[in-house]
Image: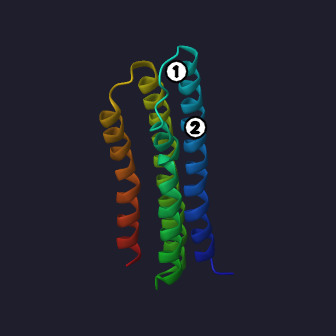
Amino acid sequence: MNIAFLGMAAALGLSAAGSAFGTGFAGMSSVGAWKKCYASGKQAPFIMIAFAGAPLTQTIYGFLLMNFIKSANCDPSLALWVGVFGGLAIGMSALFQGRCAAAAADALGATGKGTANYFIVIGVIETVALFTLVFSLLLLG
């Protein structure tokens, strides 16, 4: 068995695990914020759906990294470590993006303000995953 396959599995699996945790945290917080809005008779912001879904993109990055590992003509041990550490970094970005999105949903539900600011911070965290993907591709190149 080629150990590069383990790197491919790690790239997708760790990224997707981070997305699962991140969307779980953000989704639960969005539901709780909506509940508070409904209970107090306030309009419930639909935009919180975007908070809940923000960490999903890291699964796509993990899939892309997996495919780049598959097509890279490099040492299999390099492919393994790029997949493990790249997938872990992308997954951690998704996890903490979800935690940030959860806080954003809570804050937006309570105040009804700051939506653009919350998305900016969520975007900064997204950038970690993008940088990881690009730099991982450069390592494989």
Amino acid type shown at disc 1: Cys
Mark 1 element type: helix
Q: Check the image and report above or below for 3 versus 56.
A: below
Asked whether disc 1 touches disc 2, contact meaning CB atoms under 8 Å apart, the reply is: no
Q: Is residue 49 left or right of residue 17?
A: left
Measured from the top left, where is residue 15 in percent x and y? 55, 56
Measured from the top left, where is residue 119 in percent x and y? 35, 40
Q: Is residue 115 left or right of residue 101?
A: left
Marking on residue 131: none
Q: Check the image and report above or below for 115 versus 74.
A: above
Look at mark 2 in the image and give the residue it sits on.
27
Q: Residue at x 34, y 25 (%)?
A: 113
Quadrant containing the C terminus is: bottom left
Mark 1 or mark 2: name the one nearer the start of the chain: 2
Look at mark 1 in the image and give the residue it sits on.
37
Q: Residues within 10 Å of mark 1 (few under 14, many from 20)?
A: some
Please identify the residue farthest to the right as the structure is shown: 1
How far apart are the alpha carbons under marks 1 and 2?
Answer: 15 Å
Quadrant containing the N terminus is: bottom right
Locate residue 134: give its quadrant.
bottom left
Q: Check the image and report above or below for 99 versus 124.
A: above
Mark 2 element type: helix
Q: Residues within 10 Å of mark 2 (few under 14, many from 20)?
A: many
Amino acid type shown at disc 2: Gly
Q: Residue at x 48, y 56 (%)?
A: 57
- Residue closest to the eye, 47 or 64: 47
Q: Please state the total of marks drawn on the protein image.
A: 2
Closer mark to the observer between disc 1 and disc 2: 1
Q: Residue at x 56, y 49 (%)?
A: 18
